Image: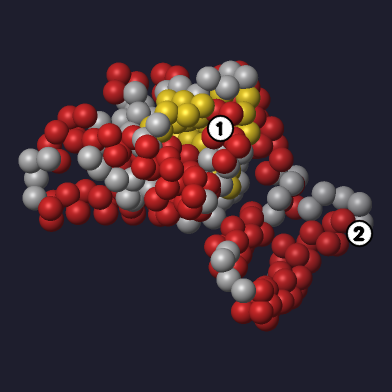
Amino acid sequence: MRALQSRHAALRPDRPLRRNAFDDHLIAALHEAFETLQGAEGVRVVFLRGAGGTFSAGADLEWMRDAIERSESDNREDAMAMAVMLKSLHDMPALTVALVEGGAFGGGAGLAAACDLAVCTAEAKFSFSEVRLGLIAATISPYVVEAIGPREARGLFATGRIFDATYADKIGLVTEVVADGAGLDAARDRISHEMMACAPGAVAASKQLVDDVAHRRVEDVMEETAKRIARARVGDEGQEGVRAFLAKRKPTWAL
């Protein structure tokens, strides 16, 4: 499922006959891949793209059939595995990008929301359809609400309706819409190239900065943000980046 290509990693859930739906095996495989990439040196960007032209149909029907026969305790254990997998994706220091085509439903849409960027094709469809099964979009909710805001999340979670790429772009679930699969390839190549200009440590620190200042009062974070930029200025990347800029040369991480 995982293919490392020098400075970017391409993860492709490969259950095309099941439209890349989640079961315990796929969740475990994704978690293992994300944990491995957490400490992978040199990886600047991680791409997720489903095999067979579909991002993910959400939960596998056979897995769901088993779930309704299990105890609440067993179901809690399964749900925690999904929650931990999503958290490991969200916390990855490298930039993460979902490349979405076909459908992204339920947990699949949540997987896209947990990425830093999401690019989809114009024909892509999305839904948080859990309520139509008597369920709720629980483990994915922190990432979806962060991406689209509480009001949009309430409406989409409560109706379970299917929506298109234009609406997904409008509410912030995706960050870019392209024409087709070739457009996804082009976006992947462009983003890979763009990330070569960015210092890896600064990328990780920038992602953490957003998490730490979001929804907090400016007065409460002023001192900490001043400390962080001061630390960055005297750090190895900050010193190298500014010196390279002044000398009109590329910094070492861009070579």
Looking at the figure, which quarter contains the N terminus?
top left
Q: In which quarter of the image is residue 255?
A: top right
Q: Residue at x 87, y 50 (%)?
A: 249
Residue 58 pos. (x, y %): 33, 34
Callouts 1 and 2 close, C-beta under 8 Å: no
Q: Quarter-wise, where is residue 87 in the image? A: bottom left
Residue occupied by mark 1:
167
Residue 246 tag number: 2
Q: Where is residue 220 in the image (x, y as percent from the top left)?
A: 62, 79
- What residue sits 48% from the left and 56% below the top? 91
Which mark is nearer the camera, 1 or 2? 1
Q: Position of residue 253 (x, y in %)?
A: 71, 51
Q: How many marks?
A: 2
SS assignment at label 2 = helix
Q: Is residue 50 above or below residue 220?
A: above
Task: Name above or below for residue 170 compared with residue 114.
Answer: above
N-terminal label among 1 and 2: 1
In this figure, which colouring scheme has been used for the structure?
secondary structure
Comparing 1 with 88, the one in front is 88
Q: Which amino acid does label 1 sit on?
A: Tyr
Distance in Å between CA atoms under marks 1 and 2: 43 Å
Tell me if mark 2 has few (under 14), some (14-19) or many (20+) residues whose alpha carbon lies within 10 angstroms of its own: few
Q: The residue under label 2 is which amino acid type?
A: Leu
- For residue 254, side relative to residue 92 (left or right): right
Q: Is any atom of residue 223 visible in this view?
A: yes
Res. 7 mark: none
